[in-house]
Amino acid sequence: MKTEAIPTPIKNYKAERNFNFWQSTVAFSTYALLLVCILGRFGSYFFFFELFSHFAVQCLGLSVFLMIYWMLFRSRMYVIALFSVILNAWLVIPWLQTETSSGTADIRVMHTNVLFTNENYGAIVEGIRNEKADIVLIAEATPIIFQHFRKSLGAEYPYQYMVYTKSHCYNVIGSRFPIEVDHTAVTANRMMHIYANVKGRKVALVSVHPKTPLSPTWFTLRNERITKAFELTAQEKVPAILAGDFNISVFSPIYESLVNKTGLHAARKGIGIFPTYRNGYGPLMIPIDHLFTNDGFKAVGFHTADIEDSDHKAIVVDLQFQQKKP
């Protein structure tokens, strides 16, 4: 009796091989994500590790997806993903817990990084004018941008000053209130240190824009610059504001350390995360533009605004005095 050979199930074999490859890839990604999240907590020691810390929101979303994925397959790998969920949720959730802010603002402050290559001067001016801030801080301004600001908004912001910060970039302030410049701090630290007379009260304002920490040297320089800015603001005896593009996110361990050490208050805390960079990248954006205050102010409003052709969203903060007028 002649028997026929049973054909090899080639298609099933290929499908199984592809599935096993996919499962191995997802398993590797799950372990790699946990490693990235853990290394981010050591960002105080090495610039590359800190880069991981800025993406806590994105890592949380990915880790939740991976946890659900492994649970559907009834794999114990879900435990590895769960560790990532817990670590990132611990970082993110406090920024999602919004509190009701009440009260009338005494001053509105706007900070915007307009991008030094931005030649859409009309859009810059219009974006600033639309927010009707009392004090405007512009990062990555150039002398040409400053000239357009003075020409178009000089009547609205008659008190102006410009400080060189790095490369081709300057920080500019425009104020509706009279200002007094601390030239010593400006020269020593390449940061703006201003006193303004706001509704009969003396207010201190510090603005900083350090280097992007993409190398060990720049990492050190950035940390030194923002540490000095935090300390300068914290030692003020009058209501004080610290604002700028810090090139550091709210999830960085260095950020956490500076806030805890100085006791300054993040204006967005209790209102939301409000990512600002890189504008146009949707869920990949991170919050690196900040405004802090000492106990002299309370934030009663915080929102972001688009400045056309800039890679940053502007931040606009409404502040209320918390100290009695002397």
Image (cartoon, rainbow, N blue to C red):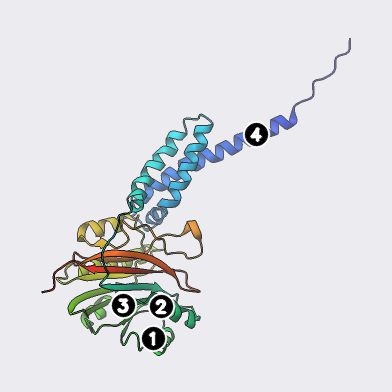
Residue 239 visible, this angle: yes
Alpha carbons under labels 2 and 4: distance apart = 58 Å
Residue that carries the numbered disc 3 in the rendered image: 135
* Marks 2, 4: nearer the viewer: 2
Cβ atoms at labels 2 and 3 below 8 Å apart: no
Q: Residues within 10 Å of mark 3 (few under 14, many from 20)?
A: many
Residue shown at 60% from the left, 37% from the top: 21
- Asked if 153 appears above or below 286 in the picture, the reply is below
Q: Secondary structure at mark 1?
A: helix
Residue shown at 23% from the left, 56% from the top: 260
Q: Secondary structure at mark 3?
A: strand
- Outermost residue toward the left in this view: 326
Amino acid type indicated by mark 2: Ile
Q: N-terminal of the two: label 2 or label 3?
A: 2
Residue shown at 18% from the left, 77% from the top: 202
Residue 194: x and y in percent read: 24, 79
Cβ atoms at labels 3 and 1 below 8 Å apart: no
Amino acid type indicated by mark 1: Leu
Residue that carries the numbered disc 4 in the rendered image: 17
Residue 206: x and y in percent read: 26, 73
- Outermost residue toward the top in this view: 1
Amino acid type indicated by mark 4: Arg
Residue that carries the numbered disc 2 in the rendered image: 128
Q: N-terminal of the two: label 3 or label 1?
A: 3
Alpha carbons under labels 2 and 3: distance apart = 10 Å
Q: N-terminal of the two: label 4 or label 1?
A: 4
Residue 314 sits in which quadrant?
bottom left
Q: What numbered label is drawn on residue 153?
A: 1
* Marks 3, 4: nearer the viewer: 3
Q: Secondary structure at mark 2?
A: helix
Quarter of the image with the C terminus in it: bottom left
Residue 244: x and y in percent read: 33, 70
